[in-house]
Amino acid sequence: MIKINNFPEINGEQLRAELLNAGITINKSTPYISNNELVIDVLEGNADLVEGIVANHIVKPIEPPTVLEKLSAVGLTVDDLKTALGLGGN
């Protein structure tokens, strides 16, 4: 388990993927922040590599879902929406 005091803004899921892509096995409950420290459960021998990955971590902006993705999430299509609005399908 390592603790990092100075770390950039992080996206835990994204950082986890970056660590896994580098071949670092981590406990699934980490990374997390506790007492202003970034905690990552890895072998101590990987500390330098992990610290380098964290230092170079840049949060990618999260793209909002599209209208089609939102409709699909509730099992609808654009034609379903048009019909519900009285605009006719197709």
Image (spheres, rainbow, N blue to C red):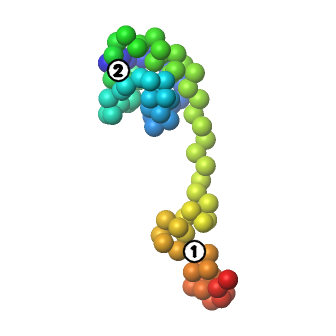
Rounded to the nearest angstrom, the CA distance separating label 1 from label 2 is 44 Å
Q: Residue at x 67, y 83 (%)?
A: 90
Location of residue 17 with respect to 75 vertically, above or below: above
Check contact, mark 1 vs mark 2: CB within 8 A. no
From this viewpoint, is residue 73 visible? yes
Quarter of the image where the N terminus is located? top left
Q: Residue at x 32, y 29 (%)?
A: 27
Q: Residue at x 57, y 85 (%)?
A: 84
What amino acid is at disc 2?
A: Val
Q: Which mark is residue 49?
A: none
Q: Seen in the image, is 53 located left or right of residue 42?
A: right
Dot 1: element: loop
Mark 2, residue position? 42
Q: Quadrant of residue 79?
A: bottom right
- x and y percent of residue 9 in the render? 53, 29
- x and y percent of residue 85 in the render? 61, 85
**45 vs 32, nearest the viewer:** 45
Query: Mark 2 or mark 1, which is nearer the start of the sequence?
Result: 2
Q: Residue at x 61, y 65 (%)?
A: 67
Please tell me how crowded label 1 is: few (under 14), some (14-19), or many (20+) other residues with Cα within 10 Å. Answer: some
Location of residue 36 with respect to 75 vertically, above or below: above
Q: Which mark is residue 77?
A: 1
Please tell me how crowded label 2 is: few (under 14), some (14-19), or many (20+) other residues with Cα within 10 Å. Answer: some
- x and y percent of residue 32 in the render? 38, 30
Q: Quadrant of residue 29?
A: top left
**22 vs 41, nearest the viewer:** 22
What amino acid is at disc 1?
A: Thr
